[in-house]
Image (tube, helix red, strand yellow):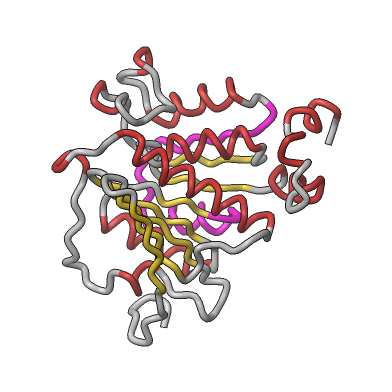
């Protein structure tokens, strides 16, 4: 690291759990963020600010006025612009020392597998079940750690799935049925700070995995009810009949 990097990341480096070695791990890391909406916005901004060396941003949507209530990586002048380009501009303004690769396309199975296989960790910041299943399957095949977050109304949840560890369940262990009901904020609404909380936790868990510090949410589902200020951690177990990771 040069002097500018040492100064920029000094408050992290001061932490004994991080230090220069942990910061170097972040600088050398590649993270794939799928979805640059309510969850992906804060996750990407904190990972960029923290000095993750290469962020790959995947989204095939454009910025809409209704996004701006919660998708803080985008701005009013970005309406109509691809979300990956809008996010790239914001992130490089925040930290010009990192590399950003925008993917303005819907990744089919082959393309998704290729992207997942070349990164250190994946953040699932999407809002539909088929995409989540596809991301999980790619992560299981490549044994790539996955940080999955979701939020709706005034509730959110987050978990970490480690297919590189044989005892870890996968996302499909949590939702074994293709018919599981998954609501979206378009249907039911969302309070803006809720996605901020979950997206920030996704960034935090990703950094902990990369730096190999502390206890992650591997094998746990953290559920947050912000209306009643209730936090619940639920133990997840590997499904021996899981169609993906058994």
Instruction: Specify the quadrant of the image occupied by residue 98.
Output: top right
Q: The N terminus appears in which quarter of the rendering?
A: top right
x then y, percent, for residue 210: 65, 55
Rendered view: 201 above or below 45: below
Closer to the camera in the image, 186 or 153: 153
x then y, percent, for residue 241: 33, 86
Which residue is rendered at x = 41% and y = 38% of the image?
A: 196
x then y, percent, for residue 146: 48, 59
Which residue is rendered at x = 67% and y = 37% of the image?
A: 51
> In this image, 21 relative to 218: left or right?
right
Q: Residue farthest to the left?
A: 187
Total marks drawn?
0
Query: Magenta stretch containing residue 105, yes or no?
Result: yes
Rendered view: 45 above or below 224: above
Q: Residue farthest to the bottom?
A: 240
Q: The C terminus appears in which quarter of the rendering?
A: bottom left
x then y, percent, for residue 155: 28, 49
Query: Magenta stretch containing residue 151, yes or no?
Result: no
Which residue is rendered at x = 48% and y = 42% of the image?
A: 200
Closer to the camera in the image, 143 or 66: 66
> In this image, 241 relative to 51: left or right?
left
Which residue is rendered at x = 33% and y = 79% of the image?
A: 243
Please state the extent of the stretch shown in magenta in the rendering: 97-121
Instruction: Specify the quadrant of the image occupied by residue 53.
Output: top right
Instruction: Specify the quadrant of the image occupied by residue 7.
Output: top right
Rendered view: 225 above or below 197: below
């Amino acid at each position: 690291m040069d002097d500018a990097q040492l100064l920029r990341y000094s408050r992290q480096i001061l932490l004994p759990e991080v230090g220069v070695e942990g910061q170097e791990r972040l600088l050398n890391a590649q993270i794939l963020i799928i979805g640059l909406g309510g969850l992906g916005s804060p996750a990407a901004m904190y990972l960029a600010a923290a000095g993750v060396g290469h962020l790959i941003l995947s989204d095939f949507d454009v910025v809409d006025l209704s996004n701006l209530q919660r998708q803080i990586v985008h701005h009013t002048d970005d309406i109509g612009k691809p979300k990956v380009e809008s996010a790239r501009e914001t992130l490089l303004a925040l930290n010009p020392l990192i590399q950003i690769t925008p993917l303005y396309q819907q990744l089919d199975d082959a393309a998704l597998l290729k992207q997942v296989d070349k990164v250190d960790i994946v953040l699932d910041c999407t809002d539909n079940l088929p995409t989540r299943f596809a991301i999980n399957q790619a992560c299981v095949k490549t044994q790539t750690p996955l940080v999955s977050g979701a939020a709706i109304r005034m509730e959110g949840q987050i978990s970490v799935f480690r297919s590189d560890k044989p005892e870890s369940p996968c996302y499909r262990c949590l939702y074994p049925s293709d018919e599981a009901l998954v609501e979206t904020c378009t249907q039911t609404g969302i309070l803006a700070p809720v996605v901020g909380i979950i997206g920030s936790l996704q960034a935090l868990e990703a950094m902990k995995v990369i730096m190999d510090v502390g206890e992650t949410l591997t094998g746990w589902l953290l559920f947050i009810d912000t209306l009643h200020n209730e936090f619940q951690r639920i133990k997840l177990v590997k499904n021996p009949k899981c169609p993906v990771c058994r």
